[in-house]
Amino acid sequence: MERVYRRMKSAGVYNITLGVILIVFGLTMGVLSIVSGGKLLNSRKEILF
């Protein structure tokens, strides 16, 4: 029975770790997309059609 609890504990730790990594990755990608969008908006004056 104790082995089951150890596995459940390790699965919980892995899930929390993966969740934190995904949150950080999502925030980073969001900031990068906002910055690149701002650069595109600033450079739209230079585009000739």
Image (spheres, rainbow, N blue to C red):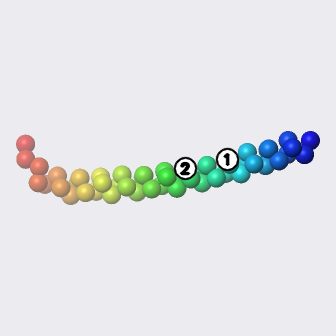
Circle 2/circle 1 CB separation < 8 Å:
no
The answer to which image quadrant residue 38 occupies is: bottom left
Q: Which mark is residue 38?
A: none
What is the crowding at mark 2: few (fewer than 14 residues within 10 Å), some, or many (at least 20)? few
Q: Earlier in the sequence, mark 2 or mark 1?
A: 1
Rendering coords of residue 12 (x, y %): 73, 48
Q: Is residue 26 left or right of residue 16?
A: left
The picture places residue 19, in percent across and down from the top left corner, at 61, 49
Could you tell me how many numbered marks the image carries? 2
Q: Nearer the viewer, residue 47 or 5?
A: 5
Q: Residue at x 7, y 42 (%)?
A: 49
Q: Residue 20: x, y in percent? A: 60, 54
The image's mark for residue 15 is 1
Q: Nearer the viewer, residue 43 or 11?
A: 11
31 displayed left or right of 48: right
Amino acid tagged 1: Asn
> In the image, 42: left or right of 47?
right
For this orientation, the residue located farthest to the front is 3
Which residue in the structure is indicated by mark 2?
22
Point 17% across, 52% down: residue: 44
With 36 as the anchor, is 3 left or right in this view? right
Secondary-structure class at tag 1: helix
Residue 33: where, in percent of width, then height?
36, 52
Location of the N terminus by quadrant is top right
Observer-nearest residue: 36 or 8? 8
Residue drawn at (71%, 51%), measured in percent from left and top?
Answer: 13
Q: Gap between marks 2 and 1, in whole Å?
A: 10 Å
Element type at mark 2 = helix
What's the amino acid at mark 2?
Leu
Q: Residues within 10 Å of mark 1 (few under 14, many from 20)?
A: few
The residue at 64%/52% (across/down) is 17
Seen from this angle, which residue lies furthest left? 49
